Image (cartoon, rainbow, N blue to C red):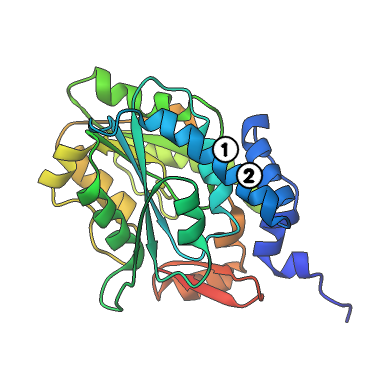
Amino acid sequence: MGVESPVERNPILNSNRGMVVASPYAKGAIETNRTLQNSEDSLDWWMEVISSSFKNLRGDLEKDPNISIVVPACDEEKFVLQLLGSVSNQKIDKKLEVIMEVNNSTDRTAEICQKCGVIVDNYKNNEKRSPVAYARQRGLEKAKGDVVVSIDADQVCEGDKWLENLTKPLFENQNMVLTCGGIKHYDGKWLLLLNPIETILRKRRIYKGKEAVGVGFGNVAFKKEVALKTGGWPQTPISEDIGLIEKMMKMGEVTVVEKAVMRASGRRQMIPIKDQVKEMKRGGNHFFDKNGDLKIVR
């Protein structure tokens, strides 16, 4: 039996070193992150650049922002900079804040986010609360913007108009309560083949109300006031995103925005199908950590 390649075995390594399929904008953030990870001085420089960009996007601190971006994060030091770098370069005339809900992290995630100049809520979650759903709810309740955007820490914006495209219908249409952008993987072999299929299933879920099993909605924007009236994020181990969308559908119009795509690391699904099925029964998302051990997140 031959020696197993660590890149084949370990999705974290693959996500850090493997082939990237994405737009030049997203590739730029991913490749910059990979290049600078081995140099503390270079990372400090990039965090200063990101912090400066966020100051411009935030604007007058005496006034509430128009948009609040909420991101749950646990042990994301290898990925979070590519997300924040891609968000900080967005072209939009609205003022925004970024809230990082850092829960139970054992690495430098909170420190890195603080150096990037975003709001950091660093806390310990207990076993009785669903980590991701609870983090999203904490962020929703802290948000000062009229529109709240929910994304994940291992994602990257596909272009510099992602945020404007995703939120524009909410500001222009009084009846619109939630918008859903696309999610495509930027690595992960067979996962790349699923990108068009997942896009079709996501639209089906929104427009026809049919079940789209296994399709996540980790790229949504919604009106804060309306979401709070529904009680906010369902506190479930999995599918809190689908649960929120189902509640918001009863409150007004919901739509898919095709030009608001986020690229996601394929790490969470890169385990054998039979193991995915077995672990899904326990609830949550799964990937391998930097030591190659299966990690269950939720």
Q: Residue at x 30, y 56 (%)?
A: 240
User: In this view, which residue lies farthest toward the bottom?
Assistant: 1
Labels in figure, total: 2
Q: Tell me which corner region of the image, top left, top right, bottom left or bottom right, holds residue 143.
A: top left
Q: Residue at x 55, y 61 (%)?
A: 268
Q: Nearer the viewer, residue 224 or 45?
A: 45
Give the residue at mark 1. 49
Three-letter amino acid code at the position of disc 1: Val
Three-letter amino acid code at the position of disc 2: Trp
| Element type at mark 2 | helix
Say if mark 1 contacts mark 2, CB within 8 Å.
yes
User: In this view, which residue lies farthest toward the right?
Assistant: 2
Q: Nearer the viewer, residue 201 or 16?
A: 16
Q: Residue at x 62, y 63 (%)?
A: 270
Q: Which mark is residue 241?
A: none
Name the quadrant of the C terminus: bottom left
Give the residue at mark 2. 45
Crowd class of label 1 (few under 14; some 14 to 19; many from 20; radius 10 Å): some
Name the quadrant of the N terminus: bottom right
Position in image of residue 136 (x %, y %) = 30, 54
Where 105 sits versus 252, above or below?
Answer: below
Q: Nearer the viewer, residue 168 or 204?
A: 168
Q: Tell me which corner region of the image, top left, top right, bottom left or bottom right, holds residue 269.
A: bottom right
Question: How much space separates mark 1 and mark 2, taking CA atoms?
Answer: 6 Å
Position in image of residue 24 (x %, y %) = 68, 31
Position in image of residue 195 (x %, y %) = 58, 42
